[in-house]
Image (cartoon, rainbow, N blue to C red):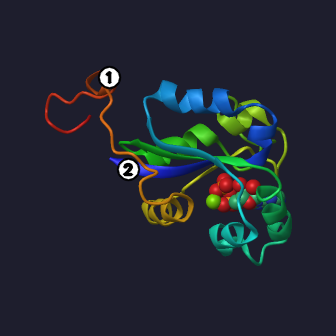
């Protein structure tokens, strides 16, 4: 099982798209084990996007991400990182394929609705940045045995 960090960015919150985007993760069978609305500080945005510090879009990105509340989620499942990235679609709304979150809900290249960790290392680091102890809950879903084949022990 993997856990990934998903952020519904300020445009998703302001445009009233939270419910529809969260539903896509629930519909897919991924489990939401952490979820909160928060305002990202300049410092947290800088740490989270440190890899992009020298890119031309960096200042605008930090301004955007700190401009209004976001919804952060910890999302768990087998292969949750890659599955979430494919559900999000390509970075730019203008290029993302239909059927993906960015492809279906946006046209902008900078306001692209959603962030998802891109590797297990990034997920672990980012979950630690955005969630405090006790905010990610390890609970069993009643439907688990219908989402996955668990007859062999491990979820398949
Ligand atoms: P990703 O979110 O699909 O992983 P990254 O290349 O890691 O894409 O970029 C991080 C974020 O920076 C993007 O989600 C987007 O908000 C912003 N961004 C990336 N490239 C551009 C650009 O060329 N113009 C404006 N914003 C950009
Ligand atoms: Mg990225």
Q: Which residue is mark 1?
A: 143
Relative to 82, does residue 55 appear above or below in the rendering?
below
Ligand 1 quadrant? bottom right
Q: Nearer the viewer, residue 136 or 147?
A: 136
SS for dot 1: loop
Nearer the camera: disc 1 or disc 2 = 1
Residue 117 location, quadrant: bottom right
Q: Mark 1 or 2 closer to N-term? A: 2
Q: Residues within 10 Å of mark 2 (few under 14, many from 20)?
A: some
**Is residue 143 rendered to the left or right of residue 105?**
left
Residue 94 spot, x, y in % from top left: 81, 42
Residue 36 location, quadrant: top right
Q: Residues within 10 Å of mark 1 (few under 14, many from 20)?
A: few
**Is residue 25 rendered to the left or right of residue 145?**
right
Relative to 62, does residue 138 appear above or below in the rendering?
above
Residue depicted at 42% across the width and 50% down the height: 3
Q: Which residue is mark 2?
A: 2
SS for dot 2: strand
Residue 33 spot, x, y in % from top left: 43, 42
Residue 75 spot, x, y in % from top left: 47, 43
């Amino acid at each position: 099982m993997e856990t990934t960090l998903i952020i519904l960015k300020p445009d998703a919150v302001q445009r009233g798209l939270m419910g529809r985007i969260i539903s896509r993760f629930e519909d897919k069978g991924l489990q939401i084990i952490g979820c909160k609305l928060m305002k990202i500080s300049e410092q947290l945005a800088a740490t989270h996007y440190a890899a992009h510090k020298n890119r031309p879009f960096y200042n605008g990105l930090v301004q955007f991400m700190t401009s209004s509340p976001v919804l952060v989620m910890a999302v768990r499942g087998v292969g949750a990182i890659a599955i979430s990235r494919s559900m999000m679609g390509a970075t730019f709304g203008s290029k993302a394929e239909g059927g993906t979150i960015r492809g279906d809900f946006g046209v902008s290249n900078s306001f692209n609705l959603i962030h998802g960790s891109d590797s297990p290392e990034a997920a672990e680091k980012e979950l630690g940045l955005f969630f405090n102890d006790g905010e990610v809950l390890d609970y069993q879903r009643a439907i688990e045995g219908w989402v996955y084949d668990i007859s062999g022990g491990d979820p398949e």
